[in-house]
Image: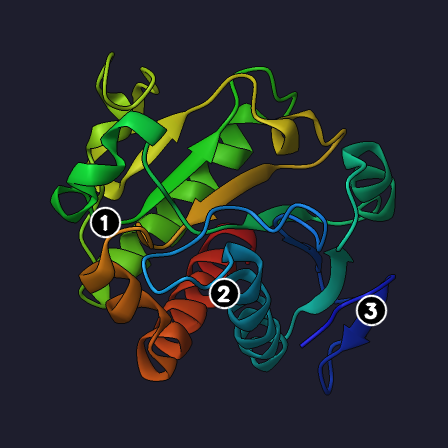
Amino acid sequence: MALFGIITTLAPNSVGAPLIALDVGHYPDKPGVIAASGTPELQYNLALAADVKSALERAGFAVRMIGQYESFGRRAREAQGAALYVSLHHDSVREWLLPQAPKFSGYSLFVSRNSVQLQESLRCASAIGAQMKAVGLKTSRYHADRVLGENRPFADEENGVHYFDNLAVGRAPRMPSLLIEPGVVVNPKDEQRVTAPAMRRAIADAIARGVSECLK
């Protein structure tokens, strides 16, 4: 599965619909973490992005797929005009914690306090997080730990949203922006759970519902 360049699609009857910039995390030369099964994160990001794109289009949004290259500046430029910038990733743990990876699981969302659209970013992240919890996922708590998770404090603990002030997507100008990590794929059980096709589609639908709640 590959997503190169800019692809903008409109769902039926969606003329004038809000545009979502859907950013696939990582790129072929640096495909992200290697999951417990040996699968590069990028492969999971692409599969989730395809399902999220379909779910957003069914919900009446226009979708612009971006990513597959290193430059965040280029990604941000291609996102211009979007009502929301969503970056899709899958989670890991710090390298020294990898032997304990099965202890870590759950989803996380991140927003940056440096964003000029912080309140809007947080509102959308909270709405998406609530919908992800509604499909049976649990929030990951270790990111907020000063040692284990690099001290990413909760912005909305109930819905799994953290502050990550140096987050690249938080620099997306003039639009709300957030990053989603559905699960910790270096944990074999969490990898199997969140990448199974049925759950992946449920996550995509949850993201679309959260976006709808936030923007409509």
Q: Nearer the viewer, mark 1 or mark 2?
A: 2
Marks 3/1 in contact by CB < 8 Å: the verdict is: no
SS assignment at label 3: strand
Q: Earlier in the sequence, mark 2 or mark 3?
A: 3
Whether 64 is drawn above or below 104: the answer is below
SS assignment at label 1: loop
Residue at figure coordinates x 20%, y 48% from the top left: 105
Marks 1/2 in contact by CB < 8 Å: the verdict is: no
Q: Which quadrant, please, contains the C terminus? A: bottom right
Residue type at mark 3 is Thr
Residue type at mark 2 is Tyr
Apparent side of residue 69 relative to residue 139 in the rendered image (left or right): right
Residue at figure coordinates x 50%, y 56% from the top left: 41
Apparent side of residue 213 relative to residue 194 in the rendered image (left or right): right
Which sits in the foreground, 156 or 149?
149
Q: Indicate the quadrant where residue 20 lies.
A: bottom right
Marks 2/3 in contact by CB < 8 Å: the verdict is: no
Apparent side of residue 171 relative to residue 190 in the rendered image (left or right): right
Q: Indicate the quadrant where residue 145 lies.
A: top left
Residue at figure coordinates x 39%, y 73% from the top left: 200
Q: Indicate the quadrant where residue 43 lies.
A: bottom right
Apparent side of residue 58 relative to residue 78 in the rendered image (left or right): left
The percent coordinates of residue 96 (x first, y second) are 28, 26
Measured in 3D between alpha carbons, the distance from the residue under mark 2 to the one under mark 3, in whole angstroms, is 21 Å
Q: Nearer the viewer, mark 3 or mark 1?
A: 1
Q: Which residue is mark 2?
A: 44
Whether 38 is drawn above or below 140: the answer is below
Q: Which residue is mark 1?
A: 106
Q: Which residue is mark 3?
A: 8
